[in-house]
Amino acid sequence: MALKRLKDLFFVLALFGLVAGITRMFAGLGATTALSDEIPWGIWKVLNMVGGVALATGGFVLAFAVHVLHVKSLKPILRPALMVAFLGYGASCTALLLDIGLPHRFWHPIVFWNPHSFLFEVFWCVLLYFTVCAIEVSPMPLEKSRFSGIHRIVKKISGPVVILGITLSTLHHSSLGSLFLVSTGRIHELWYTTWLPVHFILSAAGAGMMAVVLLTLVTAKLYHRIPPTQVLTRVASASAIVLTLYLGTKVLDLMNRGAKSILFNGQWEVQLFWVEIVIATVIPISITAVPRLRRSNAGLATAASFAVAGALLNRLDVGILAYFRSGETTYIPTLAEIAVTVGIPSAAGLVYFYFVEHFDVFDFQRGPAASRGPITAFQPQTRVWGGTLLNDLERMSLIAVIVIPVALGLFLTSARASTDEVPRTRVAAPTGTDGARDVLRMDGDHDGNYVLFPHQAHRDRWGGEDSCTLCHHMDKPNDHQTACRNCHRYMNQPTSIFDHELHQKRLTVKLGYAGSLATNLTCTECHVEGEAKRGETAEDCVTCHRENMRMSGDGSVRHDLAPAYTDALHANCVGCHNKQAREAGKPHLGRCDTCHECTPGIDTVTRKDSVVRPPAGMETSRSIIHDTLHTIHALHTRKAGGSPGQDGPADLRPARDTAMVRRGIAFGAEANVRGSRGEHPDFRKALAPTIKTIIFSI
Amino acid sequence: MKAMLHDVSRCTGCMQCVETCSLENGLVQKGADARFKTGDLSAERFTTLKRTREGRYVRQQCLHCLDPSCAAACPVGALTRREEGQVVYDATRCIGCRYCMLACPAHVIRYQWETPMPFVQKCDLCCDREGGPACAEACPSDVSIHGERDELLKIAHERIRANPEKYEQKVWGEYDMGGTGVMFISDTPLDALWPESLGNRSIPSITWPIANKTPFLALGVAGFLTGASWLIERRNRLAEEQTEDDRAQTAAEENQPWH
Amino acid sequence: MDTLAFARGPLFIATMSFMVLGLLRHIILQTHGVVRTLKRTPHQDVPWGRIFRKSAEWIVPVSHMSTAPWMKLASILFHVGLLLVPVFLAEHAFLWARGPGVNLPTMSHEFADQLTVLTLVAGIFLLGYRIFNRISRELSSRADYFLPMAVILPLLSGFLACHPAWSPLPYQSMMLLHVLSAELTFILLPTTRLVHVVLFPFDRISTEIHWRFVPGAGARVAETLRGTPEGAEV
């Protein structure tokens, strides 16, 4: 029963991994993983590839013991060890295939060579060793099949193949350590050493043997068989010796490099290093050192679990955690990454169970052959859950039907959100000022800086409540509002929603004038002949666009100009700034560099700038300014529709900075917006001292 | 050998180089204005300006090392150093393992994380552009100059000699990390920008002595294994034959009377 | 707002794929069962013609119109509306195009509105018939009242979301209700007797094959038939 539940669990995890893997294939690495330019290698490479391969070392170590040293007593667990190697490498290769950016080019290292590269060496060794593993494992299914000829051939070549396999293993296990040698100065010095190849091969050999011990014990437990404890004790002892050797080289190396001083300086890396050393070496070695413990199954299992966990932790440290400080960042794997990391070994586990049940992996006796099963009734369509779910097809398909949708919901949407859809504009109500939301705060580029959006003014201009759908398309999913740039288009050019050149081009084609370039012959199609070509002399848009013209709520056709993006945004601030500059006698308030970063010596006209960010800790006061501005603005726009104030646009002009004039920006937009709001002297008078205190104390 | 020299003391931080680079390499971004914002290197930005503590602007870009670590690390040889000195990337070979990003000591290689078919992105010193790098051409303050490395070094040392109290007495990149194609002179120290543990060594000079032992290691291990296997097997066989001989002898002795 | 985004995003994908996979599973399991049973019966010939005819009659009960004709008519209308409106509504065509990338023909808003109202009326009529007709009431289980209501709910909420003027709730809340109720239907489809949307052909097939066991198959037949449906079809 435990076995059945474990298989179900593995199936669930494998399905999660499968869906995550498929999502990665379609959405890309950025959408599914937490990898970044600072931490480009994640758990797929470091845990699945480097770590998985380390745990699969048992195959080569036991092959060495049995085939080279001819230790006959270890033969009973040679086959499980080979299975571990084969499945371990298969799992690692699968993970690697998902991890590399262009999986369809996985074969490139076969054709394009770079012998200097450690990864090139690892690739070749892993590729060849995986083949070797496949050959070494193949007798298990072959001896059960009819292909005795192939079996005989495999048997014949097994000698050289074993030697080749061990050689390759030695090479790539050390190369896996050498991989990280290139990150000089980036890996924390506790782990970075030129001895990394030696450390890696020793720890892999030790942990790999322990992995075989653990697997044998678990398998025996699951299938209710008696494990070959005596043999396992020998393997564990050998592993403990190797781990001691590993610990020794590590200590020697640290002393050699004079790293003694950093071993006790309280950095979190140091604590991690100690934890790793204790888990990976000290605990397994001490347990194995006690005869009573190493002869008991429980003791062996504990030692083996610690050794395996320790080896994985070591790879995680070297490959990811030791990079954190130099990358000045952290890396927390996404759900999809974890799903793949766990899912691939789970799938390998299922394959392992299949091998154990169908072939002679262990000397354990096999259970009785599965019967054909009873005839089951049709599941009547009215009883979906009522079935006994006895047979595997029903149970497995039910698991799949439940797990796959959950996984899809988890991975697919998060992937889609980050690639397909432009993040929604962040909109917030102005805090504490007006409940009617006349003015909204918007953060279109998600940089934390908001601009004001006179919502009520827009609404009024386009015809009240009926005009909502002009910007809010209610029926389209996820279309919450039209972006500012749809109307306020180009940054600096005074623009309109009317694209003159486009109309010219279209008319040229439509009227059959030569070519598709805009020609002046089309002028008189819209403009009155002989008159100045201006908006006033042109036909109404609605003459052509009878169906698709934007209508305001009252049914009248609108075709006025929308101010440029910059102007629309500037208009929110520049007016008050200029006024304050004049009234408070602080002319610098009217200058561009009050808000924009300015580099001395560079002409303002050509510079590329960003709106200056408030210094750290100043955000609060900044938001106070914003809120005050909202209040003013809200009250101004409520008076919208009235005549422009008596001290209208004209009196602001003298205060305008000359640099702005030089930039050639037509501030018509400013006038436009200002024209629609009336002045409210009483209010200004009432609030002016407060504004002054707030603004000028900064 | 083509190279580039940045005189940090002259830079005003106008970002013309960054903008020109984006235009030259067609690095499309979401929203044209994003190009002008300050930011770190990314797959859409091959160069950027870093502001130091002293308030100087230092260009961040591929340093085009004389002994490039990325080229040594790439398993398929997609990153190579040209005869003329530029370290270039061959997108047709790349498999996307991102090992170069681990290997780069200057940490300037970027990856297109957001696409399903991603490639590595970095400055190639406009190697196929007539008239050298676009950024050097665009610089209004002559901060960046492009030319032969020897001549640039001469210029650098001349400037330092002519103005010894202004300049730091060092050309960064002359020897650092085995020498780089992109070099800096400055009126404030730039040491914080270089990986200190490397000094004048290049990363390949550390890894190659280990990598080139691989064939010998392979042959050695294989030879040792074959020898050991053969020896032990022979010993076992001899021992077995001995016992079998003994058994045969006893059997023969036992059988004699019956014969 | 975030609830709506969640309902439209992850939850929608999860429930939609659950429905698709769940229905597929039923088809596969049923086919598997049919093949298995056929292999073990001596009579290999299946009266396909009869099965098709019976199924067609079941779908379009024109020949049985004489008994309870209004109920049959309402049933047809109800099913047609339930199938057409969710698939071919213009707004849903946008979803089809955006998600799987399928471009479907769409129906006009007016027609969709009319059909929706008719379907709603038919649904309510059917529910009323079940409650007030004695025979129907005796044959009904609790699920028989619940399921039609669950199926009508997305239709009703969708109609109100399209016509904010008549809606008692704000647009976003009504939309949330619409999405959630549709997702409930997705989950109910493969897990309740709504599964008949894909399994109705098997209804006839299994009946035909079960009754073709040779006499004397005895115990096996009994065993096979042990799990017959509890409630009869409408």
Image: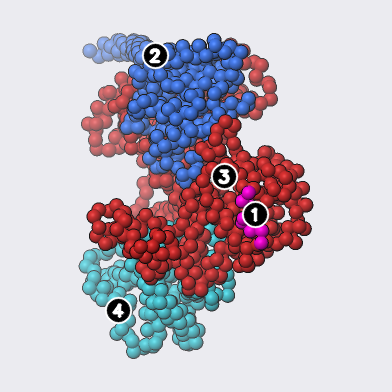
The chain containing the residue under callout 4 comes to C
**Residue at the front extreme, as displayed:** A530
Hey, which quadrant is residue C83 in on the image? bottom left
Residue A507 seen: yes
- Residue type at mark 1? Asp
Instruction: Judge by depth and name the residue closer to the eye, A483 or A639.
Output: A639
State the residue at coordinates (47%, 31%).
B17
Residue C21 seen: no
- Residue type at mark 4? Glu
Q: Give the range drawn in magenta.
A: A646-654
State the residue at coordinates (38%, 80%).
C77
The chain containing the residue under callout 1 comes to A
Reading the image, the residue beneath label 3 is: A660
Q: The blue chain is which one?
A: B
Instruction: Judge by depth and name the residue closer to the eye, C203 or C35.
Output: C203
Q: Where is residue C229 in the image (x, y as percent from the top left)?
A: 42, 72
